[in-house]
Amino acid sequence: MDDRIEELSERAKARLAAQREAEATKQREFERSLQRFMKGIEAVIELEGERPVLRYYASDGRNGCNPVKRVRHGEWGIKVLDRYDSQRDETGNRGEYGGWRLYALIRGGFCKLTRTGTWSAWQAESNQWEATVRQLTTAEVSTEMLECRDEIEHALVVAFEAAAASEEHGS
């Protein structure tokens, strides 16, 4: 019985080592892919990019004066993943903003914005949120967001295609 347990343990260890190696290989391939995209990202962002919003405030006043204020990131980027969401409270008329977004930045690297805030459907109440910013390298993105690889690469391809198309059509 002891021999059987030892054999099974060794097989499990070998399987675990193979899984870890496969995961590490996927992560390295994803990082190389991101690095290739980032080499050409500057022109794409100049054509298709935006400065990410870090803080948002809007009120819905009765007098027609509905100020909207936005504070933007200092660097231009393109949105790669959008996981922003909102939740309703039990009344359905108020709620919370949450979620996160990932942007590729013009000078290289990425930033992840994590949003928190509140919203209201009631007149004269405000909708507001703020995002905390976390700078990420391609290595960090490839490690922390490996499960999102297909979405990230697809979003980058779409951005490159849009930039090429806008250039072809002179817009």
Image: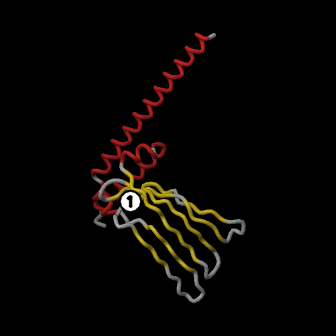
**Whole-percent x, y for residue 147 in the image:** 48, 43
Q: Where 60 falls versus 47 (above or below)?
A: below
Quadrant of the frame with the C terminus: bottom left
Give the residue at x 41% y 34%.
24
Quadrant of the frame with the N terminus: top right
Instruction: Judge left or right: residue 125 versus residue 152.
Output: right
Give the residue at x 45% y 34%.
23
The residue nearer to you, when weighing 10 against 75, is: 10
Q: Where 121 falls versus 154 (above or below)?
A: below
* Residue topped by disc 1: 78
**Whole-percent x, y for residue 9 in the image:** 55, 19
Instruction: Judge left or right: residue 157 versus residue 98.
Output: left
**Whole-percent x, y for residue 120 in the image:** 62, 73
Sort mark 1 into few (<14), some (14-19) or many (20+) by Cα contacts within 10 Å.
Answer: many
Dot 1 amino acid type? Ile
| Quadrant in which residue 63 is drawn | bottom right
The residue nearer to you, when weighing 116 against 62, is: 116
Q: Colour scheme of this structure image?
A: secondary structure
Q: Where 133 falls versus 35 (above or below)?
A: below
Give the residue at x 49% y 57%.
82
